[in-house]
Amino acid sequence: MNDTICALATAAGGAIGTIRISGSHALEILSHIFQGSGDVQSYPANTIHFGRIISNNQIIDEVLVSIFRAPHSYTGEDTVEISCHGSRYILNKVLELLVQQGCRMANPGEYTMRAYLNGKMDLSQAEAVADLIASSNKAAHQMAMSQLRGQFSSELSQLREQLLRLTSLLELELDFSDHEELEFADRSELLSIANKINNRVTVLAQSFETGQALKKGIPVAIVGKTNVGKSTLLNKLIRDDRAIVSSVHGTTRDTIEDVIDINGVTFRFIDTAGIRQTTDEVEQIGIFRTYAAIEKAKIVLWIIDATPSEEETKDILKLTKDKSLVIIMNKIDITPIKKTCLSTIPELKDIPLIDISAKKGVNIDKLEQAIFESANIPELSEQDIIVSSARQYQSLVKAHENLSRVLSGLESGLSGDLISEDLRLVLDDLADITGQGRIVPNEVLGNIFSHFCVGK
């Protein structure tokens, strides 16, 4: 933390590159390589200055430097940002000069880690920084912004206040247990408070599945017999000739993946090998991978171009019993299929049926809307709290387990001191999420911030 660090904060190859310096000697180090107006070390906070980067009396580049002084900077330290031309030579030369003057090259995520250690943000907000940078759709962006703005932290703070009230009531009961004339909150009231806290913790933990889907994309498997139009549909959805289309049965021998954005949510489409009986060893491997793709998928698109057999229907329903299934009746431009042909199968009555022509692009918009609705993604705003970190999820699961013991203890009339111990564990579990009020081990911090990009 005593080192002054530097790193390229923008991707190389652009018209402009930004180099970030942070630490107590940031301005002093800058003064050795920057030639501008006045004394560099006396530059006021929140100002921008034009000048030149100089090396051995030679001009490396004309630049702008932005000055941020502690504690009012991203890291909470004196910080300088040098904006220069994006030439790789210029950027590398400036970094080389900074290192020569006493800077150290920053580790991945070190700026954000310093922001956390200096109290500029908590751990959940720090993790949201990485999610914000990696966000590839509107929903993931909103989820990250909610955490970055402290919505999750505020929620956890409220839960901790309620837990502290529970703890204080129990400890007060213990301190004055020999005064029978005094009245305390009865166990039914304590049980009600603990139940409300546990319900909220459970909801937060359950949001992790949605958070992972928004971050990584929702997997959608396209399945069906050979030559029903699976690859044609994939190409139409992604607006590209990604998969080989042929009238020959068994053309697709492996899974093919690509992504599209529907209503601000990323979906990962997987075109699979057609399911049929075959003696072709390679095709059999592809069919095996089809079953694996169905297992991993959240949504399955079952494409048919004729009335399916009872055996095929039974197999698909068995494979997709825990999935969202959408039935697609393809090739309506050639052989329209009457929906009544499926209405006689009771298991299919509540499953969405979309008739399309993948080749002509008919009703693709309706199919996309059906896919989006099948994902069951709630409409999100920046006020909604969705947990996306596995570390946060694990802490919430532990909190739920310890709260379950609290509830059991209250229901069975367990001694208050034993219940208080479990309550303290819950408080620790929630504190682990934000890192506030807890000493976070260095290996935990290293694991969190090592996944960040250099310069952030």
Image: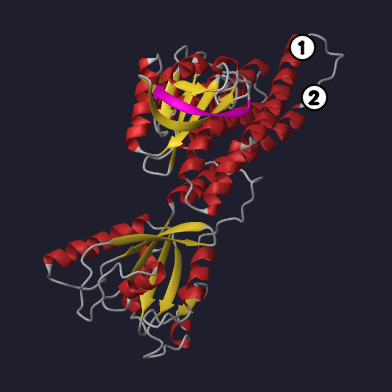
**N-terminal-most mark, 2 or 1:** 1
Q: Which residues are magenta?
A: 46-54
For residue 210, the mark is: none
Q: Amino acid at mark 2?
A: Ala
Front-most of residues 232 and 35: 35
| Residue 248 in the figure: left or right of residue 36 | left
Instruction: Name which residue lies at 49% across and 72% down.
Output: 351
Label the magenta part by its dominant secondary structure.
strand
> Percent x, y for residue 67?
57, 25
Query: Cα distance, mark 2 to mark 1?
Result: 13 Å
Question: Mark 1 highlights which residue?
Answer: 177
On screen, residue 124 above or below 184: below
Q: Reply yes or no: does residue 51 show up in magenta.
A: yes
Q: Reply yes or no: does residue 352 show up in magenta.
A: no
Q: Residues within 10 Å of mark 1 (few under 14, many from 20)?
A: few
On screen, residue 438 above or below 378: above
- Residue 178's image quarter? top right
Front-most of residues 249 and 122: 122
Q: Circle 2 sits in a helix, a strand or a loop, which is it?
A: loop
> Percent x, y for residue 239?
39, 70
For residue 185, the mark is: 2
Instruction: Name which residue lies at 40% across and 89% down.
Output: 333
Q: In the displayed image of the protein, which residue is found farthest to the bottom? A: 335
